[in-house]
Image (cartoon, helix red, strand yellow):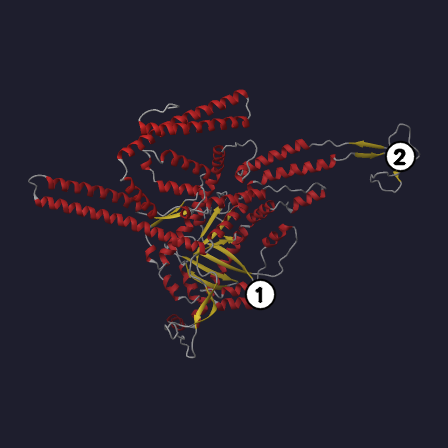
Amino acid sequence: MAPQQQALATVDAAFWQRIAEQMKAIIGRLEQEAHKRVGKRQPIEQRWIDDLLQYYGRYDAETERKLTNAEQSKLNINLTGPKTDAMAARLMDLLFPTDDKNWGIGPTPVPELAEQASEATRQAEEMRAQAEAAAQQEGADPAQVQQAQQQASAADEAARQLDALVMEGKKRADLMAHEIDDQLKQSRYHAAMRDVIESACKLGTGVCKGPVTGDRVRKGWKRRPKTGENGEPILNNEDGSPVMGDYELEMSSGSQPAMRYVDIWSFFPDMDVSDIKDGEGNFERHLMNRKKLRGLAKLPGFDKDAIRNLLEQKPRTSAPSYLADLRNLTGEKQHIASDLYHVWEYSGPLEADDMRSLALAAGDMDAFQDVQDIDPLDEVNVVVWFCQGELLKFAIYPFDSGECMYSVFNLKKDESSVFGYGIPWIARDPAASLNAGWRAMMDNAGLSSGPQIVIGGTVEPLDGDYTLRPRKLWRAKDGLPPNHAAFGVHNIDTRQEELANIVAISKQFLDDMTAMPQIAQGEQGTGVTKTAQGMALLMNSANVVFRRIVKNFDDDVTEPNIRRFYDWNMQFNPKQEIKGDFEVDARGSSVLLVREMQAQNLMLVAMHFGAHPVYGPMLKNKGVLRNLFKAQMIPADEVMLTDDEIDAIFLQAQSKEGENDPEQMKLDAQVAMHELEWDRKLEIAHLERETALIKMAETMNMSLDKLDAMLTDRREDRASRERVMAAELADKARTGTGAGGYV
């Protein structure tokens, strides 16, 4: 018998009866609080239903009934759905680029250590110079010279140690970043974040939690060695290795941390706060049938007896009403026939007495010892799973930091609630205005498509049906008076132009209020510049709103998520080589520059400054090239050589340059200087010519195509002149005399 079980067996039955009663009371209070939060969130859930109706382009039941009774058009032009999808796709593309991470980890003291290392190196060089100067002086005291040399050596050693610390910190930070990146990929972090962003765009709020462990059963196939009758492995006669048998399916709960998406309909935070970190615990509802409930018994930490008791009972609660509302969005009336178990997961603080009672009820003496002597000033978080009065799992919060494991992202924040607003809510009024104008246009088109006919009392149809049809026969009553028309015709005026203006204005309001203009959706629109620079500027302006949203995502999701993964690895990961004092850097907003503009600027830097005799040596050419590939969305590692290979090539080139003729090198430098000077002059002349051409186009009302053709001719002439100039400059540099022509 285990020590814990021996200790628990010595307690009398009356004590356990009191513990069971206390546990029932605690679970009852938690269930009461959960149901209270469900009731408080009903108005928000109704808003979410309205948002989804608008997202799918459907009217609510009341509006549908009114339009049907009034025999009006029920058409719905759904622009909210595309706007919402475009916003989600744009944010996902910006936050999670394919060639870079939107986060990073670096050692906290590196800037200070790097500065100290640089200062120590400078001091060591000064002391070494002083020692050399003292040694060269006549009559210098050998003892003082030796002391100066020792001090210089000590300074060198201190500088080397500081450099080693800086390099070690960077190395450990890189290993930690690699470890977290692997953990995120295994838990399909991008898929979870895509669901978070889509939920935030549709309903205003997206929720995720992590890192969590042991919440799912993992399957894997492993090959096991064959065993004999005595159970010992059968060994190979040749090398003594075990003889492997067939593959077997292995079930495990898994110990790697993972990030999970949380269904917003099942998440119930403290409704009295606006920030998730300030709330008094969080409830998450898991709707389960009998199959899912059995799956809980396979996970570590869950009470199998309590789950068995639940399976022997029937669910006491029906399915939430929102499930039927979600199914009815398709227009088909569907009902959920079977009841479901409402399994609640609570994570947050509890009173010390409650924690001790739950630890004893769960039979966890380790947890009981952890909460035995808790100071009332200390806040200890726990995780409690319960259902229908049964305690399914109790555990002390796994992280020493005590940080909330949930992260909440709002597309548009609400100052009074944890839940924000999405695109359908923002676009509610312009979308309603647009559809009202469109319905009015359709109703007017139907009325004005044919005349209104008034039939006098003097005629009647022979078939008794007053519907107008070709070649229909009518009978005159008592004959028609002279000059009296049997039918009066009246036409309804069309108002299509006026109503179309309402639709156009509403569409413009929809773009402005959602901050999703056509250019942000990939459409150029009318009146947009055709130049690459102009398009880049417009895209950069369109990204202003996205930068604010992405910054909120960095602060509310990326930074706390990665920090919690860092805390988990520092606390539980056995790899000592990845641990250290690190900082998390959420840099989603730093990758939002228009890539075309960034690539263009990098190209200009490389062309104009790469070979410059003054500025060229100051550039980090490898960094410029890598960022240029990144701006073009090309993985630099796949097209660039490694740093060692590049350094080897440069060393080889420098060794060959040392064998060149100094006079030839001088001439080459002069040619390069002349070429740079003429390039500058030609660029200025080119700009002046294009400015003059633009002014001429404005004066002469010249078309854009004609101006483009003229500019093309000018560029070709300029290129021809540049080739002639380059040849003459090279000839002049070699001979020392001019060659005529343009020079």
Q: Is residue 628 left or right of residue 439?
A: left
Residue 168 x %, y %: 30, 51
Q: Are marks 2 and 1 in contact (CB under 8 Å)?
A: no
Where the N terminus falls, by quadrant?
Answer: bottom left
Which amino acid type is marked by label 2? Thr
Left or right: 100 in relation to 494:
left
According to the image, label 1 marks what residue? 314
Q: Secondary structure at mark 2?
A: loop
**Residue located at (38% from left, 53% from top):** 178
The numbered mark at residue 458 is: 2
Q: From the top left corner, tell me how far across and down residue 515 is, in percent.
A: 52, 38
Name the kind of residue labelled 1 in the image. Lys
Q: Which of the two residues, 271 or 438, is positioned nearer the viewer here?
A: 438
C-alpha gap between disc 2 and disc 1: 75 Å
- Quadrant for residue 75, please give it: top right
For mark 1, give the secondary structure.
loop
Residue name at image x 32 percent, y 56 percent: 577
Taking the view exactly as shown, the residue that stands out farthest to the left is 139
Residue 477, percent across and down?
91, 36
